[in-house]
Image (cartoon, helix red, strand yellow):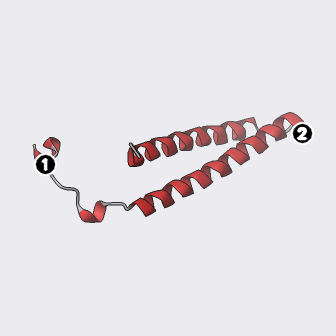
Amino acid sequence: MQQFAGDDQEAPERRIGAKRKHQILFLMGISLLILLFITGTLGVAMVAFDKEVFVAHMIFAGLSLTLATVHAVTSIVWFWPY
């Protein structure tokens, strides 16, 4: 029951420093930009060059949306209220 009461201390080896948190969010942001660039490129390829890449475009769009959501939630949880 002590776990649910909040009386226990977090183990020091499980702590993540602010610098490491920023590094993780930076890598997530770079990955997100790459996914967005690929999604946009596939969208342009479909429209401008009449390529059959709709499924790939939708997969990368879904991955982009998922990573954007994870990036936003992680940054809010780690750095709220700044």
For the N terminus, which image quadrant?
top left
Give the residue type that dot 1 points to: Asp
The answer to whether residue 52 of the structure is visible from this angle is: no
Who comes first in sequence, dot 1 or dot 2? 1
Q: Tell whether 3 sits left or right of 41.
A: left
Question: Residue placed at 89% from the left, 39% from the top?
Answer: 49
Q: Position of residue 36 (x, y in %)?
A: 68, 44
Q: Tell whether 25 sits left or right of 57.
A: left
| Mark 1: secondary structure | loop
Give the residue type that dot 2 points to: Phe
Residue placed under numbered mark 2 in the picture: 49
Q: Position of residue 2 (x, y in %)?
A: 11, 46
Q: Image quarter for residue 11?
A: bottom left
Q: Image quarter for residue 20?
A: bottom left
| Mark 2: secondary structure | helix
The residue closer to the viewer here, 42 or 20, is: 20
Q: Tell whether 47 sits left or right of 34.
A: right
Q: Residues within 10 Å of mark 2 (few under 14, many from 20)?
A: few
